[in-house]
Amino acid sequence: MNLCTVYPWQLFGALGAVRETAEYPASAQALEDSASLAMSSKQLTGLLQRRPALSMDMMQLMTVYIQEMQLRYRELATERVEQRICRAMLRLVAQSGHRVEDKIELSVSREDLAEMTGTTLHTVSRVLAEWHRQSLLDAGRERARLLEPHALVRMAEGLP
Amino acid sequence: MNEHPLSAETTVAQALEISAHVGPRLMARRTACVGCYLSRFCTLRDTASYYNFPVNPFIDELKQATSDIIVSQGGLHA
């Protein structure tokens, strides 16, 4: 299951600064060729003590993560799978979508969507096929092109 | 002469960044643009088209509501 997508220059895995012996219940996986910079828990803790403003930045970051987790938990508990897939796609659009001709395109695979929404690959394929039939989007192997983005927003928000 | 930074081709996200007065105008027109996932992609022209109102009066209204930008630049409305 995908808990969180990290974008370039975003800090991640900072739990060790608070508890040196903490173990993550998740692991990181690169979606494309990437380089990451790392520092030891001791170094980060020392840095936070010398520069208190960094602590505030870390709290901000943790708040964003907590909010995102709470949102995802609420969606898992209360929303239909179509709505969850729709929201996940739109969140990706807002973060990393780009215009191709007059449409919005994003790089995402069915596997990614299944992991992000806590559902199966089969369900994602079924939902995307239905949206394709309704001409809402055109989904390829590793990308999706939104043909009717506003219709997807209405679906995500549960609007008629 | 200062040119107003808002035009029909300005995206909703840019317009919201340009002035805090844009959000209330969009809400007054009963759009769902504020906080929308697509604000980076939709222009003000797209908004007018989607919600079915004429674009030019809409842009004029936004320019009027955000005329303080020009004032702060020491331009036309000072």
Image: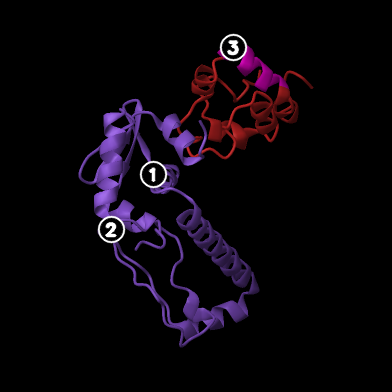
Residue found 54% across the figure and 61% down from its top: A70
Which colour represents chain A? Answer: purple
Q: Which chain does the residue under circle 1 lie in?
A: A
Quarter of the figure with residue B16: top right
Residues in magenta, as a range:
B53-64
Q: Which chain does the residue under circle 3 lie in?
A: B
Q: Which chain is red?
A: B
Residues at marks 3 and 2, CA–CA distance in whole angstroms? 44 Å
Is residue A48 found left or right of A146 in the rendered image? right
Q: Which mark, residue B56?
A: 3
In contact (CB < 8 Å): disc 2 and disc 1? no
Q: Nearer the viewer, mark 1 or mark 3?
A: 1
Q: Amino acid at mark 2?
A: Leu
Q: How many other residues sit within 10 Å of disc 3, few (<14), some (14-19) or many (≥20)?
A: few
Q: How many other residues sit within 10 Å of disc 2, few (<14), some (14-19) or many (≥20)?
A: few
Camera-nearest residue between B60 and A51:
B60
Q: Amino acid at mark 3?
A: Asn
Quarter of the figure with residue A129: top left
Residue found 50% across the figure and 17% down from its top: B49
Residue identifier under label 1: A82
The relative height of residue A21 versus residue B75 in the rendered view (above or below) is: below
Q: Which mark, residue A31?
A: 2
Q: Position of residue B65 (x, y in %)?
A: 72, 24
- Magenta stretch holds residue B70: no
Mark 1, secondary structure of its residue: helix
Is residue A40 found left or right of A140 in the rendered image? right
Q: Position of residue A78 (x, y in %)?
A: 50, 53
Residues at marks 1 and 3, CA–CA distance in whole angstroms? 37 Å
Mark 2, secondary structure of its residue: loop
